[in-house]
Image (spheres, rainbow, N blue to C red):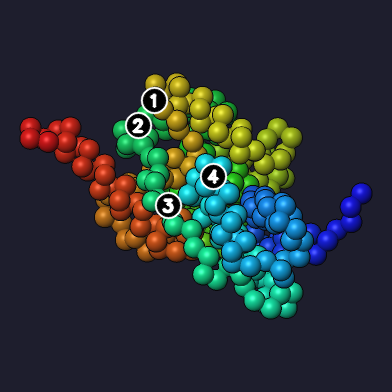
Amino acid sequence: MRGLGPFDHAIDAFLAWCRAERAYSQNTVDAYRRDLRALQEHLSRQGIHDPAHVTGPLLESWTLDGLQADLSRSTLARRRASTGSFYRFLVEDDVVDADPTEGWTVSSPRRALPETMSETKVEALLAAPDRETALGLRDATMLELLYATGLRVSELVKLPKSAVHDGWLVVRGKGGKERIVPVGDVAMDLLDDWLDLVDPDLPWVFPTKRGKPMSRQNMWLRIRKHTVAAGIEGRVSPHVLRHAFATHLVAHGADLRAVQAMLGHASISTTEIYTHVARERLKRMHAASHPRG
């Protein structure tokens, strides 16, 4: 069995730093690992086994291989970002003397507008669960919270009771960063009713029968069930509800910085996409409704 080489040690050290120092999510760490292992395999075929021997032209050849393999521009841009983070770490840790990613460019893909839902469809989805049953009340509460707060599904299913306050939540998001998110009266009333049914000895807002947090996959299935019951066509997921939360806020005049804070976006440029979504929806409504549309 081949022993670990310099590239293996460098990748392992970088991923450990991502987990321990940056507190990145497991999904982010896994994405870094996949990209860097793909780079390592490409370089190995060129006879390069040490990150200190990597040059800009070698990275450019990796991009060319990706284009020839019909990889999307977004995948190539993500690889570029992963490799840049990797080499910035190696330079700061004195593993390599120079960053070969400087000057390596991958044209950024045109950002696609996120999928969202109309307010009418959201209302139909929220009304679908039978709130007279415990399971229906739980599902209704989760859906209302998703739409009322814009939480990521991973944040919702692992929401601890200690995060719940009167009219707001303290949410721990990506990188362990905390943010305060207001909760409207409708969602808050449902949440209070649901918590009255939850075992007081369990720390989670939405525990399973085994006392563990619900999985993201199970949450997706619950939404799918209620989407069908509401007669809504198309793909609806927790992330679509997060997009609907942001889009509807922006469309009704919410301050973009406030929406950024509630979503937990690190950059305002990420939040600005919702202004484009709102404009596109208005254009479609005008085209469908105006006699000269």
Report the residue marked by disc 4.
Answer: 68
Nearer-N-terminus badge (2/4): 4
Q: Mark 3 belongs to which amino acid?
A: Pro
How far apart are the alpha carbons under marks 4 and 3? 17 Å
- On residue 232, which mark appears? 1
Between marks 4 and 1 in the image, the one whose residue lies nearer the viewer: 4
At a point 32% along the width and 37% down the height, the residue shown is 119
Report the residue marked by disc 2.
Answer: 121
Q: Position of residue 90 (x, y in %)?
A: 69, 71
Mark 2 and mark 4 residues within 8 Å of each other at the beta carbon: no
How far apart are the alpha carbons under marks 2 and 3? 30 Å
Q: How would you rate the neighbour count of disc 3 (Cα within 10 Å): few for under 14, some for 14-19, many for 20 or more?
A: few
Q: On screen, 124 above or below 88?
A: above
Mark 1 and mark 3 residues within 8 Å of each other at the beta carbon: no
SS for tag 3? loop
Q: Position of residue 260 (x, y in %)?
A: 42, 60
Q: Position of residue 254 (x, y in %)?
A: 31, 57
How far apart are the alpha carbons under marks 1 and 3? 31 Å
Q: Mark 4 belongs to which amino acid?
A: Gln
Q: Residue furthest left?
A: 292
At a point 22% along the width and 43% down the height, the residue shown is 282
Q: Position of residue 141 (x, y in %)?
A: 50, 38
- Left or right, 230 with respect to 193, comes to left
Between marks 2 and 3 in the image, the one whose residue lies nearer the viewer: 3
Residue 196 visible at all: no
Mark 2 and mark 1 residues within 8 Å of each other at the beta carbon: yes
Between marks 2 and 4 in the image, the one whose residue lies nearer the viewer: 4
SS for tag 2? helix
